[in-house]
Image (cartoon, rainbow, N blue to C red):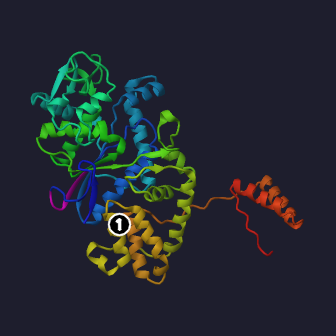
Amino acid sequence: MITITNTRSGLKEQFIPHTPGNVTMYVCGITPYDRAHIGHGRCYTSFDLLYRLLLFYSYKVQYCRNFTDIDDKLLKRAQEHYGDQKRYHEIATMYMYAYHEDMQKLNCLKPTYEPRVTDHIPAIISFIEQLINKGYAYQVGGDVYFHIEAFPSYGALSKHTLEDLYAGARVEVIAGKKNPLDFALWKKEPKGQFWQSPWGYGRPGWHIECSVLAHEYLGDYVDIHAGGLDLVFPHHENEIAQSEALLGHIFGTYWMHNGFVQINKEKMSKSLGNFFTLEQIFQQFDPMIIRYYFLTHHYRAPLEFAIDDIAAAQKAYKRLLRVFNKIESKKVTIDMLSEYPIAMQMIEALSNDLNTPALLGIIFESLHMLSSDIQQLEIIKYILKDIVGLTLQPLPETEISITPEIEALIQKRDAARAAKDWKMADALRDQLRSLGFEVHDTKK
């Protein structure tokens, strides 16, 4: 049995798909205007784990993750890069390739579908037309807005009332809007730019895209809808309003959100200058260390990003490599788990709202008991590789170069030890350590 903390109810619930044996899962994807950052890495590692766990439980999973390949940031980047915002498609394609490389390095499985928004403009226009016809949306000039007051349960996901939203609102006053909080479904553009629609030339708003793509690829019911905590409001709130207004029934049974990545107690943000891309981090650490590091934290908890913590995670991961290096992987099924109590505990931890810290704790607490239990080690290796997604491949050896400066410090320390100047020897050892070299003394 899998349990999930459902943002919509605020409770941990047993997972029961709408159609027995089949799961539809939608995870909001990136806007490909730059390299993926560590927040993306954490999000897609978390829900890759969920995808793998569902497959282990023998569900047939349709997993959709989109690319928002039309957006103000993309237009700005195209203007900066090419001097022409119309080349936004090239920018998106370039960063989509880079994103796929990063996901592959993190050993994230490919989703069933990865649609680009710009390939689905007719479907988006049709969706908006239907909302207008049902009285949930209206046109102002060449723009189209969703009228939140026509959807009484607006704010239920984020636990906001309309009064709360009015009090904290910073919205542009636009003549003709029925409510200042009404959000754009279609944005007008000068004649001839982007796409022709019944309301003139324009492009879709951000929120409508995921509603349309989820419906196009997964149908009327989405079992699991997931993304980062920052998407709860307004993005996912608006998705619910659009989709349920059109469909007339619940959209997204289980809503899951991973916690923020924080640096110095602040959410990682380009504007704060505390921003790290996966590409940058992979230059310092093997991607499997980063995946392992993400999984040492519960997906819903904030992650206080720190290089020292990654280094500690690297030591723990290397310990796993030493244990499982020469162990074969042996496939296990749910029915077989009762024969392997420690493996059973690991799956139970994962099934309990993806409790990866508990899973890792079970492994390390049990290693001394498992040294002679080769068969269970083989099962555990399968779980770590195929469900947790850790490749357990030997890490590339780092080439150590002893420069003349390092050699001089070592000789100086040897001389201090020979003179029994222990204070100086210790200071030189600390200096070497700060430069990345650990000195160990032997009898020789």
Image quadrant where one finds the N terminus: bottom left
- Residue in view at x 11 percent, y 41 percent: 248
Q: Which of 263 and 114 is in front in this view?
A: 263
159 horizontally vs 327: left or right: left
- Measured as percent of width and height from the top left, residue 52 is found at 32, 61
Q: What stretch is highlighted in magenta?
A: 19-25
- Residue in view at x 42 percent, y 53 percent: 104
Image quadrant where one finds the C terminus: bottom right
In the rendered view, tell whether residue 333 sits above or below residue 266.
below
User: Which residue carries the number 1 mark?
Assistant: 349
- Measured as percent of width and height from the top left, residue 227 is found at 33, 46
Instruction: Judge whether residue 116 can be spotted in this image.
Output: no
- Measured as percent of width and height from the top left, residue 336 is found at 29, 77
- Residue in view at x 18 percent, y 45 percent: 251
Instruction: Judge whether residue 44 can be spotted in this image.
Output: yes
Question: Which quadrant of the structure image shows residue 207?
Answer: top left
- Measured as percent of width and height from the top left, residue 232 is found at 31, 41
373 horizontally vs 433: left or right: left
Mark 1 is surrounded, within 10 Å at the Cα level, by few (under 14), some (14 to 19) or many (20 or more) other residues, namely many
31 horizontally vs 13: left or right: right
Question: Which quadrant of the structure image shows residue 296?
Answer: bottom left
- Residue in view at x 27 percent, y 72 percent: 334
Residue extending furthest toward the right: 419
Q: Which of 435 and 3 is in front in this view?
A: 3
Q: Is residue 168 magenta?
A: no
Q: What residue type is labelled 1?
A: Ala
